[in-house]
Amino acid sequence: MTRGMDAVKVLTELSRETPLYPAYVLTGEEDYLKDQVLAGIKSRVLGPAAAGTGLGADGGLNFQAFDGHETSAAAVTQMAETFPFLAERRLIVVKDPDLSDPAWPKYLESPQPTTCLVLYCHAGQGVRALTPFKDAGKKGNVAVVECAAPKPRELVGWVTERARAAGKVMPRDAAQILVEAIGPNLLALDGEVQKIATYVGAKPSVTAADVQAVVGRVTMPQVFEYIDAVVSGDTGAALSRLSGMLGPPGSELQILATVHSHYRKLVVARSMLDDRVPADDILPRLYANSWAAEKCLSQARGLTQPETRKAISRLFEADLAIKTGQQEPRLALELLSLDLCGLGGGARGGRKD
């Protein structure tokens, strides 16, 4: 195995039974790929029965998962030094670790070979924080895995492949409609592909009309107008834009997924701004369309990194509230909009950068 791999390469090597690293750092904005890599690692360390993507999936006595906000790096690395119970390896996963803690690079100087440590980082983790881990990677002790979404021009092909895996043929024009409606959120795209496959039933192929019938009518320009209102703290405009996006029952989750996808881009943009990365280097990470990328970067300048993280957490809460029936979908989105407006830089005045 080589160091500095992207998620797709890691997934390929995991499937080929190549040797495991003592530690993995999963970074980047695409949680869908992080979950897939984690599932692959769990399958290798604990067996196929424990390959669920969730951090809480049963792994027996040789699996532990920790919240980095609640458990220190020193405590985790001390546990990592212990031997597995009647097995070749044990797996330890830490969600949202503090990468600045010196206990991590100290442990990685000579990691326990019978432990596989996975640091599952949030999307806004700064580039500088990864430097010690990349240095450890030169010794073969850790793999820093970049879990970035495919480039916009590659998304259509990715969607057609997911449709093929679901047993359907999806022409590029139909896949393009789906990508434009949902955006570069792989989890949301995969979910829509599955819904479309169910919708067409026994039909072997998916048409553009099938896609439109399932995904509804939300467009990225509408989302940009909505986010503009949210970032400026204009609750009236935000609720008006939200009303314009709402369609038939069921459209709420599509709106939520699209807004979530865009906010993940804002997290990336804000993090890179904080790291003083030049704008010309940030824009290609956001959208292929130059106008959309510049618009996204402008919106990120109106937010702080803590605000973008709070927004992501609030989006997760709204998604959970809708899916568990705790709130009526439209009400959940309206309450979400009010909360996001409260985070907007314009609500207090002044730009962040």
Image: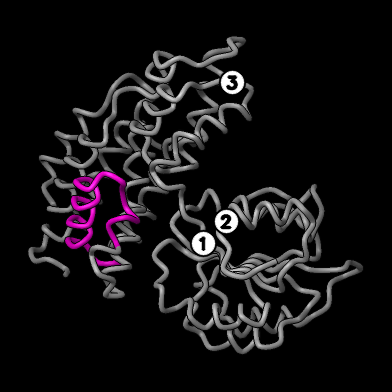
Q: CA distance from mark 1 to mark 2?
A: 6 Å
Q: Which mark is residue 95?
A: none
Q: Contact (CB < 8 A) between labels 1 and 2?
A: yes
The image position of residue 264, as x and y in percent, is 36, 53
Q: 209 or 253, which lies in front?
A: 209
Relative side of 137 to 341, left or right: right
Image vertical order of residue 119 relative to residue 176, above or below? below
Helix, strand or loop at mark 2: helix
The image position of residue 90, as x and y in percent, is 78, 68
Disc 1 residue type?
Glu
Q: CA distance from mark 3 to mark 2?
A: 25 Å
Disc 2 residue type?
Ala
Residue 206 lies in the magenta-colored region: no
Q: Which residue shows up at 55% across the image and 79% down it?
A: 133
Reading the image, the residue beneath label 3 is 168
Pointer 2 local density, CA inside 10 Å: few below 14, some 14–19, many at least 20:
many
Q: 90 or 300, which lies in front?
A: 300
Q: Residue 325 is drawn in which quadrant? A: top left
Helix, strand or loop at mark 1: strand
Query: Which circle's residue, 1 or 2, is located before the other in the chain?
Result: 2
